[in-house]
Image: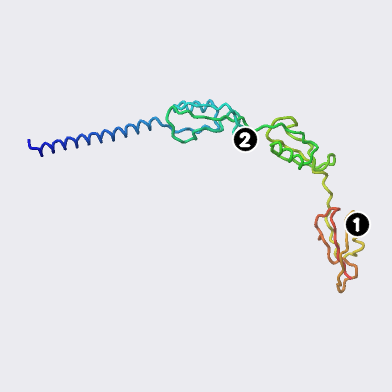
């Protein structure tokens, strides 16, 4: 057989062997990838579930679970429920990979101090220092207790809770009156009448008004119809 024919035949043999090897490698790679993908699962979301529920969900996917011994306080996740996990939910994981979880001990509970008899400001500072929150503030008015002082709390002192509700007395409501319209009245008589009822009245000035008798009220502050309290000041301007 001529040498050229023998070389050509040997070349075709090597080419065929190379094609077969390449085909084998391609199919081997695809098979391995498919095998790996069939062994991978997505980590489910476990936060908020109980340990039993999380264990069942992971067992169905072939993922073991490890519970961290140290519980952590969490304001949103109830005690006994999972508050954190690793890997995070949605990430791919091979079957057999351990998923680590941390269990919540519930909201941080602190001993409630004695707040009854303290002012609102003092109580809020004390609660802030202790890491406690004011759950709610209710108010009422009564002459039987000092003004702006806490008269009740819930929970009571020495209880353990993350929040506390307060009841505060705002003091007896001050009496108020409707300011009369005194325009056109004699200024001194009006001032005297209002002062006898506990109001502070001042005649702040006088202006010439043709045709209006001297001493007649021509302007007032507050105007007629406004609510006034005895502690409020009333100013009158009269004619001259």
Residue 111 screen position, x and y as percent? 71, 31
Where disc 2 sits, the SS reads: loop
- Quarter of the image that includes the N terminus: top left
Residue 102 occupies which quadrant of the picture? Answer: top right
**Which residue, as the protein is rendered here, is positioned at the far front?**
3
Q: Nearer the viewer, residue 240 or 50?
A: 50
**Badge nearest the viewer, 2 or 1:** 2
Q: Residue furthest left?
A: 1
As displayed, is residue 108 above or below residue 230? Answer: above
Which of the two residues, 89 or 33, is positioned nearer the viewer here? 33
Q: Residues within 10 Å of mark 2 (few under 14, many from 20)?
A: few
Q: Is residue 196 left or right of residue 51?
A: right
**Residue 206: percent from left, percent from top:** 87, 68
- The answer to whether residue 34 is above or below residue 121 is above
Q: CA distance from mark 2 to mark 1?
A: 58 Å
Q: Which residue is mark 1?
A: 195
Residue 129 as seen in the image, left or right of residue 48: right
Which residue lies under the disc numbered 2? 75
Above or below: residue 219 compared with residue 229:
below
Q: Nearer the viewer, residue 106 or 229?
A: 106
Residue shown at 79%/41% (left/top)?
119
Residue 182: give x, y in percent of width and height: 86, 62
Residue ID at (79%, 36%): 116
């Amino acid at each position: 057989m001529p040498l050229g024919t023998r070389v050509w035949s040997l070349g075709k043999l090597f080419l065929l062997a190379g094609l077969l090897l390449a085909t084998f490698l391609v199919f081997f790679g695809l098979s391995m990838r498919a095998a790996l993908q069939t062994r991978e699962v997505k980590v489910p979301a476990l936060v908020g579930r109980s340990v039993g529920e999380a264990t069942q969900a992971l067992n169905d996917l072939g993922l073991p679970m490890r519970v961290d011994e140290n519980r952590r306080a969490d304001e949103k996740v109830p005690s006994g429920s999972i508050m954190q996990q690793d890997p995070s939910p949605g990430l791919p994981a091979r079957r057999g990979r351990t998923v680590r979880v941390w269990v919540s001990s519930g909201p941080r509970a602190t001993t409630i101090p004695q707040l009854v008899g303290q002012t609102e400001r003092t109580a809020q500072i004390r609660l802030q220092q202790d890491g406690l929150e004011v759950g709610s503030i209710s108010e009422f008015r009564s002459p039987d207790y000092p003004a702006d002082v806490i008269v009740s709390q819930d929970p009571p002192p020495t209880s353990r809770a993350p929040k506390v509700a307060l009841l505060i007395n705002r003091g007896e409501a001050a009496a108020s009156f409707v300011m009369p319209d005194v325009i056109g009245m004699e200024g001194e008589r009006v001032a005297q009448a209002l002062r006898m009822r506990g109001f502070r009245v001042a005649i702040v000035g006088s202006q010439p008004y043709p045709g209006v008798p001297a001493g007649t009220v021509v302007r007032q502050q507050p105007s007629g119809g406004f609510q006034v309290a005895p502690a409020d000041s009333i100013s009158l301007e009269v004619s001259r």
